[in-house]
Amino acid sequence: MAQTINTEVTRVDARRKVTGTASYAADSIPAGMLHGALACTAVAMGRIAGIDTARAEAEPGVVAVFTHETLPDYKTVKGFYAGGPGSASFWPMEGTEIRYAGQPFAYVVAETAAAARRGADLIAVRYEEDAAQIHMDPGESFIIGAGEDSEGMTLTKGDIEAGLGAAAQTVEATYRTPFQHHNPMEMFAATAEWRGEQLTVWMPSQSVRTLRGGIAKAYGLPETSVRVLSPFVGGAFGSKAGVTPYAMLTIAAARAVGAPVRLIVTRPQMYTVATFRPETEQKFRLGADADGKLTAFEHVEIAQTSRFDDVVNPGTHMTRSMYACPNIHTEQRLARSDTNSGGFMRAPNEMQTFFGLESAMDELAWKLGMDPVELRRVNDTNRHPVKDVPFSSRSLMESYDAVSRSFGWADRGREVGSMTDGDWLVGYGCATATYPTNMSPSSARVRMQGSGHAYVELAAHDVGTGSYTIFAQIAAAQLGLPVEAVDVVMGEADLPLAPIAGGSTTAASSGSAVHIACTNIARGVAEKVAAQKDGPLAGLDPAQITLENGVLKGPGGESQSLAEALASTPMGEIEAEGQYRHPALTDKALRMTYHGGYGVAGPVTPEMAMFAFGAQMAEVHVHRYTHEIRVPRLHGAFAAGTWLNRKTAHSQLMGGMVWGLGSALHEITEVDTPRARFLNANIAEYLIPVNADVRELRVEMLEERDDYVNPLGVKGIGELGIVGTAAAVGNAVYHATGKRLTAIPMRISDIVSA
Amino acid sequence: MKNFAYTRPRSLGDATEAAGNDGAQIIAGGTTMVDLMKIGVLAPETLVDITGLGDLEGHAVGTDALQFGALARMSKVADDPAVIEAFPALSEALWKAASPQLRNAATLGGNILQRTRCPYFRDTAYAQCNKRDPGSGCAALDGGKTSHHAILGGSEACVAMYPGDFAQTLVAFDAQVMTRGPGGTRTIPFAELHLLPGDTPHVETVLEPGEIVTAITLPRIPAMANSHYLKARDRESYAFAAASAAVGVEMDGDTVRDVRIGLGGVAATPWRARAAEDALRGGPLNEETAREAGRIAFEEAVPLEGSAYKMPLGADVVAGALLTVKSRIGGE
Ligand SMILES: Cc1cc2nc3c(=O)[nH]c(=O)nc-3n(C[C@H](O)[C@H](O)[C@H](O)COP(=O)(O)OP(=O)(O)OC[C@H]3O[C@@H](n4cnc5c(N)ncnc54)[C@H](O)[C@@H]3O)c2cc1C
Ligand code: SF4
């Protein structure tokens, strides 16, 4: 492959972003635009008994106030977990029912954003309040769909009790993870403009096709009548994937007032009007023989869900894929409480489950008196522990060995509390990272000009990860052009199909489509020049002409650059589409993607198991007097097939590790139990790491070749770096203090109370 | 945010007059004020911006006293080598507060008058908050989450915590506050500026309507030079204290001649741990006495379910701060 792949390429949109010329969805201001604002409930459960909008309507600048009684033409869609495109199955403002705190109950349209907000504050609402419970009760958990949908939700292989009985050491432990919110920097926003039956929606989105399909269907419009635009996205992490009430309310309001309306959701409202990471409980029972070989592996995950959706992100599918073990039992359980529906948030099941699994593995290592790295080595496997198919590639121990070297793992004190630095207790911890390689179908269209310029078009998204850049690189490499000569157009639903920007699929899936489109360009040009009278490739069999680094080559050493060849054709320009579909992708998954859903092949196909792996190591300091936990060093080594862009890949892994650090020490959506509300709905009180928390952070990117996953050999990396960090930190806390913290985040109060 | 009138007077007299009007409130750096206006907790009819009063911006480190104008910026004072040398704890307390952006904007006058971070106070969706809406009850005490609430000085009406850092150095080192109000100027001992919540948590200070803080002064005492501000917080920067201590020590050989202990992150107001100081004065300072002082500092604490950890934590922070100062003195 050409030189632009596996090199460091600066983002093509970097300058536009830092100079403010990159236009995000909410930056588009259609003529005559009005402003929307949401009014949200204070109570979590009950009914709206009455709404008085008089004062709001009298507020200068307010154009209209809509309630469940007065908003015409408000449409809803089916929820994601019920097979639809919606963020949840329950839709506020269809009636008087209140199902969660912070549920929208009125929509104000005004001439300015400030007037709209003021109007929303002036609405007087009366509630009939019922009791609500915000935390799940793990004792009330259940396994979903106990019928045909329950595939893999429970799994038993061998005999778990026998495995535990035969073990030299066992660990039984429960770990907890909290509610978390994505908190992208860019606020949720939607701008809607109707022109007759033509609707345009500007909205930061991880899936413009899902949005367009959902809206068109709800309004009974042909998809060609609905434009959805999301050119740049200022972070999403799973929060901007579905069709949300705030979007549909804005669309209805714009229609009702006969003018474009833009809504920017406030930060506190962002905690209730869309999804979040549900709280979970992770129960493990592990057994191992004296050499550390697992004899029993049991994992029961209980995740919170709403009363109206079964939000299941099956984490046990991931943990049971990890280590070899003859006796495996897993259960994927849910427990309901009174919230909006959760959803997926960066590493949606891996973050929680690997905090549990990798903490439990550490406990096991201590019990066995074994180096925790060696415990992973003993249980490493090249065949999937349940499906018994080979891993397409698996560099777990290579990752451990690399990170052990860079980190100095061998230098650690072998006993708990054996290392100090002044008033700080010092500990080292490690953990495994893994993420499934999910392959979505995708298309891409490439147009190339003989002058040496190319356009790549597809309905994919750059959620801040660098997709614009890698697609330009992939095309540039094949077409023999500099990266700057390739323009990538994305974030529009009218462009060729691309999947949801989720599950770390975009680079591998849409990148493969770009690759195939470029191959098709070469074939088209080859056919044309072979048929011409003159030229170095004239008269050759086009099937024998190959493309290499932008140069067409004949069997006898004839060659011509693709651009030159193209310039010699009558049109001087060519367009081709590329369609990528992993051979293992089912027709059902294909159709699902075309209908805006999340259809993938993998991670386990009938032939292979496809996962990326890594290993993380943390040095933790715990202060003797302040009990603060700090992480002066965090190292990770990862292997994920081909690195398309070493710079943006490094950033993804580094950003993932920082996020993982946040999950370890900071991130939690606090809860007010009696009133069933989220409590710290702002980023002053919802802590995430600041610069000072991230000290030495090292990312090592290992070389790995995988010919099975896709033509480019790429695995997804957007979420890999988060997985395991919290456990590595927790394991280091144990090494430093002898305190095993079984819940994240791990805070001063936990150290003091442990 | 409600609409409001805005005025930026040029003289202290005009400012006092304007600020004394009904519905008027003072704004300095605005980092507390604008925040609370945006979230609907405060809705002044008129904002009286005092940043036009240039005379209040300076500060001076004299041989007998330290003087700070009410409009001196946090970052400027924290960064002054003379302050760092004369009173390291004061500089540290300012450095460890908020973020660089906030410290550049915020004033010392505004800082000492910053409002609680009690999440129920800050979210108007909660109907119960005696501080925000007198007589409405207290959501925190009504089964709410209390992990960031006061274990010292709270009442049955309110257990909100005073969140600031800087004030702990003032309360422990006998600062005074100069004010100018409709009735003229006065000097208030800093320790008397803030009021315990009692039955009236909405009345937080002794300041009269229209009364403007003009300056803060501190007598220079030997314990200042050997002082330290230790702040326990869940992230390395930009976080309020889980517990903190501003301490200063003056030794006479192996005996403590003077010691000052201010407590943050644990009390309803800036808090001085006098009993702990008394226990140390006249005796040695070592791990044992430092820990005992920490214990005494929290003897009268009333922990709530969520804030119980603050008792052992606060005690350890006091001990840690004292021992740090001790080791610095020893190292000289
Ligand atoms: C996200 C965030 C994090 C923070 N973290 C910390 C922290 O870790 N530690 C910490 O100590 N602080 C912290 N703060 C608080 C910050 O230090 C204060 O907001 C700031 O010091 C207030 O100063 P100001 O000049 O902006 O005051 P303003 O917001 O202008 O005023 C604050 C109050 O004081 C009154 N006022 C102001 N000046 C005078 C005067 N001269 N006379 C009479 N009344 C006056 C105002 O009416 C108002 O009630 C944080 C703030 C934020 C927003
Ligand atoms: S503790 Fe004080 S500020 Fe907080 S809710 Fe209760 S009364 Fe209001």
Image (cartoon, grey):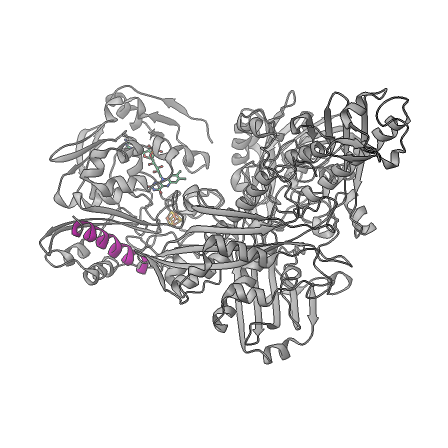
- Residue A371: tell me if it is visible: yes
Quarter occupied by residue B152: bottom left
Residue at x 84% of width, y 30% of height: A526
Residue A467 occupies quadrant: top right
Q: Is A748 colored magenta in this rendering? A: no
- Relative horizontal placement of residue A364, taking residue B287 as reference (left or right): right
Q: Give the range drawn in magenta.
A: B312-330
**Quadrant showing the C terminus of chain A:** bottom left
Would residue A209 appear left or right of B190 to someone viewing this image?
A: right
Give x and y (percent) for residue A494.
Answer: 76, 32
Give the main secondary structure, helix, strand or loop, of the magenta stretch: helix
Lateral position of residue B247 relative to residue A719, left or right: left
- Number of numbered discs on residues: 0
Q: Which of B85 and A652 is in front in this view?
A: A652
Residue at the location (30% across, 42% down)? Answer: B203
Task: Using the image as rendered, state which of residue B136 and residue A34 is in the foreground.
Answer: A34
Q: In this view, does A51 lie above or below A589?
A: above
Q: In this view, does A62 lie above or below A736?
A: above
Q: In which quarter of the image is the N terminus of chain A?
A: top right
Q: Where is residue A747 in the image (x, y as percent from the top left)?
A: 42, 55
Q: Position of residue B61 (x, y in %)?
A: 17, 32
Of residues A669 and A113, the one nearer the viewer is: A669
Quarter location, residue A502: top right
The answer to whether A54 is drawn above or below residue A316 in the figure is above
Furthest toward the front, the residue is A556
Residue A177 in the image: above or below residue A157: above
Residue at 80 percent of width and 47 percent of height: A590
Q: Where is residue A285 in the image (x, y as percent from the top left)?
A: 57, 71
Is B328 covered by the magenta stretch? yes
> Can residue A132 be seen from the camera position used here?
no
Return the residue nearer the eye: A61 or A288.
Answer: A288
